[in-house]
Image (tube, rainbow, N blue to C red):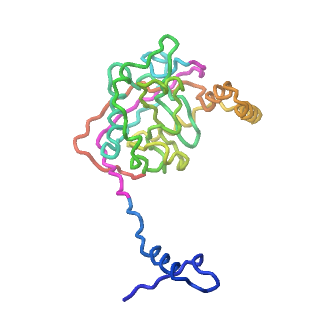
Amino acid sequence: MASSIVIPPFLSAGGIISRRNLLLSTSIATVSPPSKLPSPDLTITDRIFLDFSLCPTYFRSDPSATLSSTTPCSDSTSLGRVVLGLYGRHVPLTVSTFKLMCTSSSTSYKNTPVHKIFPGQYFLAGRQGLRRDTAEISPLLKDLPRNTDVVNSKSFLLPHSRPGLVSLCLSENDDDDETRLDPNYRNVEFLITTGPGPCPQLDGGNIVFGTVLEGLDVVTSIATVPTYKPSENIQKFNDFAEFLGDERAQNARSLWNRPLKTVYISDCGELKVTNPSLSPTLP
């Protein structure tokens, strides 16, 4: 049976259809829609644990509070363990880098702080920066391979649709500008969504590479830690200063949403996976 041709309204004028418009409408009707990208492979290939602790100290504006090997405090309280399942087949380089940062015996995520908390949305961890006693990035980070997942559009397909998703920070990256300009810079900052709802503002700019398998209650408890919030007048003044090009505005803004008590990763490592499995809940 011959298929009918529907003439778009914009191709006809006053009910008169020209031969050129008829040919154009036929070409529009026969254009096939673009092929749909295949669904990401959410097989959990690796399991990583992160132990979180809380210091009874208030946040201090200290640039040395980044990737380090010193314990933030001696009288900390354990918040519990979070077990992550990673999508190694979806974004293999992102997962391998994250694993290395959790298992290295030299420099890793161990003893590094959760440096920003956005209540009801997510928290950030794994920040790099220049320490006061050295001008070098850790040698381990210099040895990390470049992550080509960040230039692959398929890496950004998964949405931040629920609590407990772990994502590589790109649009939300909080590393020092001077650090990011280093030719040996490798992005290892990550976020975990805390819920209760989705975070669509993160979609398309950050790479979801895993999910919380155990310890979602620990994630939600971190989200309740009080943070620094400037008054409305301070925010307006800061916006105006930024409009005028005052660099101090950005420096002040970097303190917003910082936890008022130190939450940090007290330990981390790998849990062996004998049989890779699909994620129990898809994002």
Quadrant in which residue 209 is drawn: top left
Q: Is residue 213 above or below residue 176?
A: below
The image shows residue 204 at horizontal and vertical percentages of: 49, 48
The image shows residue 152 at horizontal and vertical percentages of: 39, 45
The image shows residue 206 at horizontal and vertical percentages of: 47, 42
Verify whether residue 38 appears in magenta.
yes
Q: Residue at x 62, y 27 (%)?
A: 255
Q: Residue at x 59, y 80 (%)?
A: 12
- Between 73 and 172, the one nearer to me in the picture: 172
- The residue lying furthest to the right in this view is 233
Q: Is residue 68 above or below residue 100?
A: above
Q: On the picture, is 121 further left or further right than 247? A: left
Verify whether residue 179 appears in magenta.
no
Count of number-bearing discs: 0
- The residue lying furthest to the top in this view is 133
Q: Quadrant of the N terminus?
A: bottom left
- The residue lying furthest to the front in this view is 19
The image shows residue 229 at horizontal and vertical percentages of: 67, 32
- The residue lying furthest to the left in this view is 274
Q: Residue at x 53, y 28 (%)?
A: 115
Q: Is residue 119 above or below residue 78?
A: below
- Between 77 and 103, the one nearer to me in the picture: 103
Quadrant in which residue 138 is drawn: top left
Residues shaded magenta: 37-62
Q: On the picture, is 250 further left or further right than 171? A: right
